[in-house]
Image (cartoon, rainbow, N blue to C red):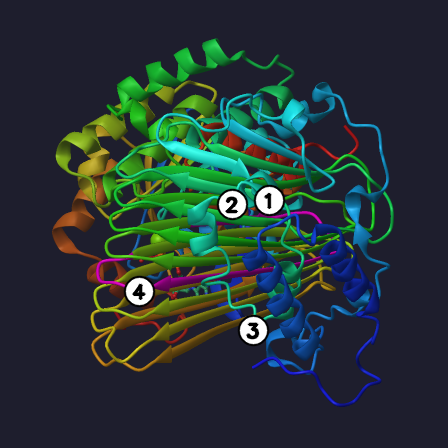
Amino acid sequence: MTMRPSTEGVVTGSDDAFLASYEQLESRDHGVVPPWLIALRRAGIAHFGELGFPTTEDEEWRFTNVGAIASLPTHPAHSWDNPQPAARELERFTFGQMPSIRLVFIDGCFTPSLSSTELSAEGVEIHSLKNALQANVDWVQGHLGRYSGADKNAFVALNTAMVEEGAAIRILPNRRIEKPIHLLFVFNTTQRGASIHPRILIVAERGSDARVLESYECLQEGETFTNVVTEIVMGEGTRLEHCRLQLESKRAFHVGTIHAHQARSSHLITHSISLGAKLARVNINPVLDAEGCECTLNGLYVVDGGQLVDHHTAIHHSKPHCNSHEFYHGILDGKAQAVFNGKIFVRPEAQKTDAKQTNRNLLLSDEATIHTKPQLEIFADDVKCTHGATVGQLQDEAVFYLRSRGIGKDAARRMLVHAFASDIINRISIEPVRTELDQIMFDLFEREPGV
Amino acid sequence: MLEIKNLHAQVEGKKILKGLNLTIQPGEVHAIMGPNGSGKSTLAQVLAGRDAYDVTEGKVIYNGLDLLDMEPEERARAGVFLAFQYPVEIPGVNSTYFLKAAFNEVRKHRGEAELDAIDFLNLVKEKMKVLELPQSLLNRPVNEGFSGGEKKRNEIFQMAVLDPKLAILDETDSGLDIDALRLVAEGVNKLKRPDNAQLIITHYQRLLDYIVPDFVHVLYDGRIIKTGEKRLALDLEERGYDWLLAEYRSQTTETPSGLVGAR
Ligand SMILES: Nc1ncnc2c1ncn2[C@@H]1O[C@H](COP(=O)(O)OP(=O)(O)OP(=O)(O)O)[C@@H](O)[C@H]1O
Ligand SMILES: [Mg+2]
């Protein structure tokens, strides 16, 4: 449970700026947006008020101090009229101009001129969230906020209070969408405290199959704040591959939460790749709420310097015969810190659950720290749950094998670190994304120093 | 080409090699046999430069170089190749990428230009054919999911590509069926030239039917206790090691530590 401790000194106590942002939004939107949205936001801010920013006394946030976020002079990132970047400046965020349905958000604002001309295509209906809310699209109202748990997590509550922009995606029944749907969030501002609270709703109707990519980038290095919530609603027999790439500024703060609700025989695949930000926290919470569901959670974090990355995943096995697989790899250098907390809840009726969790970490420096913790709470008796966490250096035998073929010690090590990352990247089915990430890993690890 | 003098090595405080002497001239093929645990792989790994083994005494001169003073990659570039008894699986490292990196390092050392991708691929395909390895292995991570036999053939394939001066084969024949054995032998024999040499560690005479050794050595308790010609291998196959160990024990005043009669 998240609770605000009574010891006032621990809390930075400046949620005021966040409250002011909310009030500004509410007064501006009054009478413009549908009343149900006003009510949703109000509930959000009320929860945020009750919960407050978590402190490290909260078990869920033990190693991740968000004090620096709480004390940011937060304001909507688009408050300054920065000149809009040219399309060519964004090219490097497009995976070699990968064919996709692309929605571009500059400083949190949907920018049609940089996005695909047709958002909705055969079998899929896509709106920027703002447009969907103004048009009062019924399925958006039906799902928004239904599963996200704003009462339990302060950041989700805050996002809910600030619901304004983002994306609403509906994949129609039995349709397979070939092109990836790419939501590209780019910070153009460098204003300290520039904040975005995107909300993304993905509704996959029965038998559909699609791939959604969220990427978080920046044109400039700034102390920005992203607080995004993605809600995924999966119908029967659906398949959804969701990929989030967090490549923000090394000074940025990034909090992202994914809630997925899965119906019978649906298969969710998520990839969380986290390279940027000074502090990044990602929560992924799939609920396997019917028989025959499957979810696969892949993750890769690569951090150095003073970066901190925290993944909290919670897989809820609520019904029998569901499988979950989780593979997270971390590479830590410098004084970086990483947190991996993998919860698996198996409810009493969830017999024949098969859950597998692996978290492997490579520490490239003595000063890097990792807190890894599996947390299995199993209330059914006929289940198979395995977990394993490793923390260590490269395998000596592998290094020696490469060296014994003439490959230098450093090159051998770099090759193996890269391979460790590739092991996760290769699970992404979108080829241009894989290629791009592989190049990033190559540049990070294999390019000769000084070349 | 290779001169090992009074080599002592230990691992985790346990003495394994205890004064080993061996000289190999260019053009020669030497076989090393010996009971399990006698130190054969240790010798191979020490020659390749595995730092888990501490050399406490002795010298190894390779083509005029102090081999023990060189890093593993320097040894490889200078032409030493070890076919591992247990090839290591390396998930995530593509076989072609790995081999090309190794190949170019060796060429660079020899002062030769790097091969372009097409020439390299042609070379690789030609060598694969000799070993009848499926080309699909090139697209897979190094050794990952390879069958036992594929791993062993892959070692010889790498050897064929890297074209070493001194090849050390550590039980490359174990676990191979007779056809694979013949392919491996063929690969090794193709490499045979007056200016290079091979050191073949094996338990079985049958490999030596295809790769004919000039000398056969028996390694026991960290030392070479007998050297003979090819027929020594036949004798060992027929009679086992006991007669030799008995002979050895009666000759030495000092009893070899603990191990006597243990196997
Ligand atoms: N890393 C190690 N740690 C501890 N003991 C070791 C290690 N490596 C080898 N040894 C021991 O050293 C001895 C020699 O091992 P080695 O592998 O060299 O034998 P071998 O002659 O190659 O045997 P085999 O015929 O079974 O391959 C054995 O008793 C072995 O258990
Ligand atoms: Mg051995």
Q: Which residues are magenta?
A: A270-293
Which disc number belongs to residue A289?
4
Q: Quadrant of the C terminus of chain A?
A: top right
For numbered disc 1, what is the local secondary structure?
strand
Is residue B40 at least partly visible in the picture?
no
Q: How many marks?
A: 4
Asked if the residues shown at circle 4 and circle 2 are in contact, with their CB atoms under 8 angstroms apart, the answer is no
Q: Which residue is mark 3?
A: A151
Choose the circle earlier in sequence order: 1 or 3. 3
Which disc number belongs to residue A166?
1
Residue A273 forms part of the magenta stretch: yes
Choose the circle earlier in sequence order: 1 or 4. 1
Mark 1 to mark 4 CA distance (whole Å)? 26 Å
Mark 3 to mark 4 CA distance (whole Å)? 20 Å
Label 4 Cα crowd, 10 Å radius (few <14 / some 14-19 / many 20+): many
Mark 1 to mark 3 CA distance (whole Å)? 21 Å
Give the x, y percent position of residue A443. Answer: 67, 34
The amino acid at mark 3 is Asp
Please state the chain letter of the residue tagged with numbered disc 4 in the rendered image. A
Residue A377 forms part of the magenta stretch: no
The answer to whether dots 3 and 4 both sit on one chain is yes
Asked if the residues shown at circle 2 and circle 1 are in contact, with their CB atoms under 8 angstroms apart, the answer is no
Eye-nearest disc, 1 or 4:
1
Choose the circle earlier in sequence order: 4 or 2. 2
Mark 4 to mark 2 CA distance (whole Å)? 28 Å
